[in-house]
């Protein structure tokens, strides 16, 4: 599992946008608005897909 910090995640709508996009990529993940993190359960390719997807949405993703 890899945890990504997503500092621009501010509200439930952000969580909804992120979740919808990651679901479309068929990734296994959890989102925490409280911690401003997305945890990816998968291989390095899955993590990179998540980072690219978040970037496309306008969120930076910083590996912890």
Image: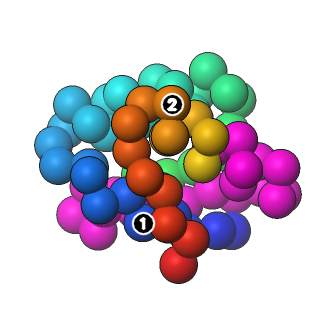
Image quadrant where one finds the N terminus? bottom right
Outermost residue toward the left in this view? 11
Magenta stretch in the rendered image: 32-50
Tag 2 secondary structure: helix
Q: Residue at x 17, y 49 (%)?
A: 10
Residue 24 falls left or right of residue 13: right
Question: Left or right: 51 with respect to 45?
Answer: left
Q: Position of residue 61 (x, y in %)?
A: 48, 57
Can I make out residue 53 in this image? yes
Figure check: 5 above or below 41: below
Please state which of the two labelled residues, at mark 2 or mark 1, is closer to the viewer: 2
* Residue that appears at 64% across and 68% down: 2
Q: Is residue 19 visible?
A: no
Q: Say how the picture is coloured.
A: rainbow
Q: Is residue 27 left or right of residue 14?
A: right
Question: Residue 58: x percent and y percent?
Answer: 38, 36
Residue 39 position (above or below residue 26): below
How many marks overall?
Answer: 2
Q: Nearer the viewer, residue 7 or 14?
A: 7
Could you tell which of marks 2 and 1 lies nearer the N-terminus? 1
Query: Rounded to the nearest whole Å, what is the CA distance between mark 2 and mark 1?
Result: 16 Å
Q: Are marks 2 and 1 in contact (CB under 8 Å)?
A: no
List the residue tagged with mark 1: 5
Q: Is residue 56 magenta?
A: no
Badge 1 crowding class, 10 Å Cα cut-off, few under 14, some 14 to 19, many 20 or more, is: some
Helix, strand, or loop for circle 1?
strand
Work out whether residue 38 or residue 52 is closer to the camera in this orientation and state it.
Answer: 52
Q: Residue at x 43, y 52 (%)?
A: 60
Q: Is residue 40 above or below residue 1?
A: above
Image position of 4 with respect to 58: above or below: below
**Mark 2 sits on what residue?**
56
């Amino acid at each position: 599992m890899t945890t990504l910090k997503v500092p621009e995640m501010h509200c439930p709508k952000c969580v909804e946008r992120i979740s919808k996009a990651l679901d479309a990529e068929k990734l296994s993940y959890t989102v925490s608005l409280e911690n401003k993190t997305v945890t990816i359960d998968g291989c390095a390719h899955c993590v990179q897909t998540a980072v690219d997807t978040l970037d496309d949405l306008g969120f930076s993703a910083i590996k912890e």
